[in-house]
Image: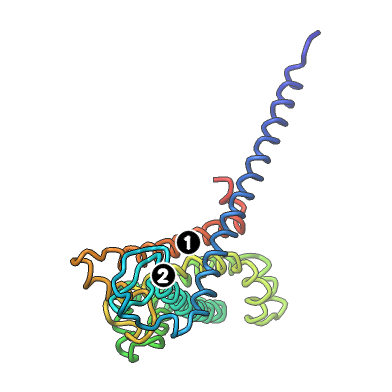
Amino acid sequence: MKIDSSTIRESLLKERQVEYKDELSRKRIWMMIIMILTASFILYVYIHGSLINEEALSSNFREKLMAPSKSHIFGTDHAGRDMYLRTIKGLATSIKVGFIGTIASFLISIIFCILLVIGKEKTDTIVNFLIDGFLSIPHMMFLILISVAVGRGIRGVIIGLALTHWTGLTRILRSEILELLDENYINISKAMGKSNFYIFKNHILPHLLPQIVVGLVLLFPHAILHEAGITFLGFGLSLSTPAIGIILQESMKYITTGHIYLALFPGLMLVFLVLCVNRLGENLKSFLDPNEIHR
């Protein structure tokens, strides 16, 4: 019996398509599991940290500088405070400050995006000049200057994060807007007398939403790290505020005496939190952009 070669090719092609769909399905399931796990960890840290009261963080000098044990899994600090509770509380503060700073940066980016739609070439020149100007200044130095200028503390850090983190998202959205403004349906809407705000809301914003969501999630870990960084250097949150930067700063004094765990565990938790947020953003990007999952 003679077998047609075209039939064999079609059969092989169908088998490959089925295998490819199964592989994509497995990838999506795996990414969904990772997203749920990372989001659960972030929520756990924030909710648990928010529920920790001052009494749980009170000093107990009878238990100072205790090594990690069942009762204190991260050990205790120089004042006998549980380092695990302090770490979770500090990370919750970093999440809160980083989230507010990220949202503030997003609002600045949206304002510039609206101005780009309204002002066209002149506005684009100004926005591009501002982006280049802000990026030309060393990031951490600029953040410290702004934080100190407005009085440090939570307000100073949030304002600093907002004024230094809008550039990356704005640059991405700017390139998208400039491409969209040349589309035929945009020109048709203008010819029909639609306002610039209508065009932005109904034609441009829906295209920008995936970029905005992914940009916000990926901006979030940068804000957390920078908040912890300037607080560690002494230019961020006040010493009375439970923050991971302050915990690490205090722990440096005791590393030489052999109490490495005071800095090790909070530092690892900070890194793990940032990696979780970053992984959440990468997987979200793959879900919103169909081309990403094929790579």
Give the residue pinned by disc 1: 278
Q: Is residue 191 above or below residue 272?
A: below
Q: Three-letter amino acid code at disc 1? A: Asn
Residue at horizontal 32%, vertical 63%?
264
Residue at horizontal 63%, vertical 40%?
23
Disc 1 element: helix
Q: Quadrant of residue 235?
A: bottom left
Residue 123 seen from this side: no
For marks 2 and 1, the one nearer the N-term is 2
Give the left or right position of residue 127, taking residue 138 as reference: right
Towards the viewer: 27 or 110: 27
Which residue occupies the extreme bottom position in the image? 151
Q: Quadrant of the N terminus?
A: top right
Residue at horizontal 71%, vertical 24%?
9
Q: Three-letter amino acid code at disc 2? A: Tyr
* Image coords of residue 266 (percent x, y): 36, 67
Q: CA distance from mark 2 to mark 1?
A: 23 Å
Residue 89 seen from this side: yes
